[in-house]
Image (spheres, rainbow, N blue to C red):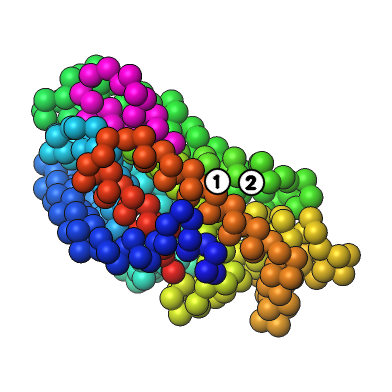
Amino acid sequence: MEAITRAGLDFASALSSDMALFEEALRERRAAVYGYLDTWPGATNFKPRDIHDALFSYVRRRGKALRPLLLLLSCGVVGGDESRAIPAAAAVEIFHTWTLVHDDIIDRDDTRRGHPTVHAMYRDHAIRDHHQSDREAAHYGLAVAILAGDLQQSWTYALLGDLVSKGVSASLVLELAQRMSVNLTPKLLEGELLDVQFALMPPDSLSEERILHMLTLKTGALLEYAAWCGAKLGLAGRPDNAGYAEKLGTFASLAGIAFQLRDDLLGLTGDQAELGKSVGSDLREGKRTLVVYKALQSASGEQRRLLTSVLGKADASSSQVTAALDILRSTGAIADVAALANSYVERALALLEELPANEYRDLLRSWAAFLLARTH
């Protein structure tokens, strides 16, 4: 995996030299965003208790807050006042949270951040406290999770509305809300459904372009919005003659695609203890990742037969998965995807050089390094 850790800069070195500064920046902004959410007065309207607790479940587990951080740094790099953008950063975090709640349903995942997912939590609650059958309890868990995610999406727009009280013009707030509703949300949901549909399709019916398009929508769209939104708030209505908002959005989207490609590689080559799931689980789930697509394009007939026999087979044996992983390596698919991820990183970092040279640009570079230097 050495190739994936280098792309114009050595991520490990970049992080080690600026780690203390970056971690402090992340810690301060993470605390500000979650503090805002924890004390938001309108939460008293989130009823009944199961909806309220489900809505706050992932919030209380405290994610890394990399999207809110991206928004705030993008605000600062163009000369804006970060404190005015806190409600928008909180909105982005809640937007991300509702997508996780619904994504966990779609993927049928029972754990998130080491704890039960919302639908699993309330399924178990219905069994334990209401003595429901497994079937009825599963339905209740899904109902709570769907409704909680819906309410989180509504909360997102209320948080954007809070920007007015911070001195942001109503016209700008409307622009941010419209882009979220008519650009971001359709893109993200399209990417989510394409990901589901791809698993139902013969691998040969796909293409590298289609898979990368899906990743751009599913992973890159929210990052793009966060950076663009932060820049728009930082500019506060001033002319953006240099195109900073769009450049920051493209930077974030490119980094997001590289992140997802790397995530796919980690799922195949990472350390099982660090990943928290079995290596090769994506193969058993039948995910049409770019690695699998590339391997099938250059595999021999026998290799294709073996690889397709494992793809989507939930009960594939460890030896079958190991053989499939060997094919991904021997065909050069893993190396090809690693190189492609690096090319996205290089393009993203080049865009940063077109932004004002200040501490925020340095922190954005560290943000990209932090995003991409992960091992689990």
Q: Position of residue 234 (x, y in %)?
A: 22, 30
When the figure is inspected, residue 325 is found, relative to residue 217, above or below; the finding is: below
Disc 2 target residue = 211
Residue 97 in the figure: left or right of residue 37: right
Residue 115 in the figure: left or right of residue 269: left
The answer to whether residue 237 is magenta is yes
Q: Amino acid at mark 1?
A: Leu
Disc 1 target residue = 215
Crowding near the residue tagged with mark 1, few <14, some 14–19, many ≥20 C-alpha atoms within 10 Å: many
Residue 49 in the figure: left or right of residue 182: left
Magenta residue span = 228-250
Q: Position of residue 271 (x, y in %)?
A: 50, 77
Whole-angstrom CA distance, mark 1 to mark 2, is: 6 Å
Which element type, helix, strand or loop, lies under badge 1? Answer: helix
Q: Nearer the viewer, residue 134 or 320?
A: 320
Residue 191 in the figure: left or right of residue 78: right
Let me know if residue 306 appears in the view.
Answer: yes
Residue 250's quadrant in the figure? top left
Q: Amino acid at mark 2?
A: Ile
* Disc 1 to disc 2: CB gap under 8 Å: yes
Which element type, helix, strand or loop, lies under badge 2? Answer: helix
- Rendered residue at 44%/69% (across/down): 375
